[in-house]
Amino acid sequence: MHIMEGFLPVTHAIGWGVACLPFIAHGVKTLNRQVKERPEQRMLLGVSAAFTFVLSALKMPSLTGSCSHPTGTGLGAILFGPTAMAPIGVVVLLFQALLLAHGGLTTLGANVFSMAIVGPIAAWLIFRGGRALRLPFGVSVFLAASLGDLLTYVTTSVQLAMAFPDPLGGFKASLLKFLGVFALTQIPLAISEGLLTVIIFNALRRFNPKELQELDIKGVQG
């Protein structure tokens, strides 16, 4: 993540793009409903989108055809729900592909699926699970953001292993290779993203507690 332009076989590129469509459509409906019901939340929505854009634009070379970087999707997933990040991710990744040569148009579907669908869903489920277990709010946010980041790269590794299975060991051997290479750079980045997301949430809890309560962020006062 991001997988570069033209790196995936055509069938894989199309397949991942098609897989994203229902999530994007549902996300657009979710965002439209939330903005209509609470137009004052547009500022937080903009903060979430900007956070995702900036963090996911900070790339570190990882292996041929890809790179490592924070994703920034955990913040928006916790605030607005996981599906809301799908259309935001499309816009972010499209602008990065066109303006920064980061990712690509043919690999947009694969990149959206890993960063803007799997990552946010994982982050949201982990956050909710942490609060259900009565973990401290900051711990729940940290686990959600950091593990959501890591699971994004697990998904990317699966995508690359499916596209380029090892000649001898097949999909499994290729997956282990991709996971091993990504882990070297992504684990410290995921930890950093988790800590930064906690800092951002602490600021929001201090200066925007009413907005967080209106979004029904579970345990925001805990």
Image: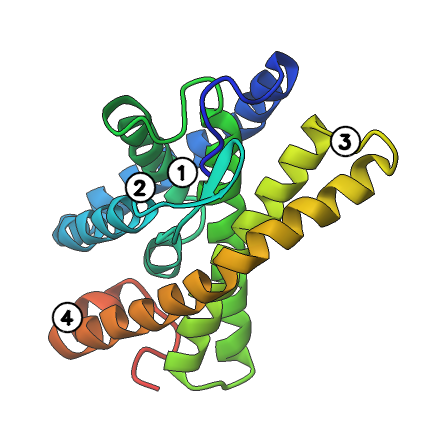
* Residue furthest out toward the right: 168
Dot label at residue 31:
2
Q: Residue at x 26, y 71 (%)?
A: 201
x and y percentages locating residue 45 in the rendered image: 22, 49
Numbered badge on residue 199:
none
Mark 2 residue element: helix
Q: Of the two numbered discs 3 and 4 on the same chain, state the one appearing first in sequence.
A: 3
Q: Which residue is mark 1?
A: 27
Q: Quadrant of residue 208?
A: bottom left
Vertically, is 119 above or below 171?
A: below
Label 4 crowd (10 A; few <14 / some 14-19 / many >=20): few
Q: CA distance from mark 2 to mark 1?
A: 6 Å
Q: Is residue 67 visible?
A: yes
Alpha carbon separation for disc pair 4 and 2 = 20 Å
Viewer-nearest of discs 3 and 1: 3
Kindly indicate whether the residue at mark 4 contacts the one at mark 3 (C-beta within 8 angstroms): no
Q: Give whichever of discs 4 and 1 has the lower sequence position.
A: 1
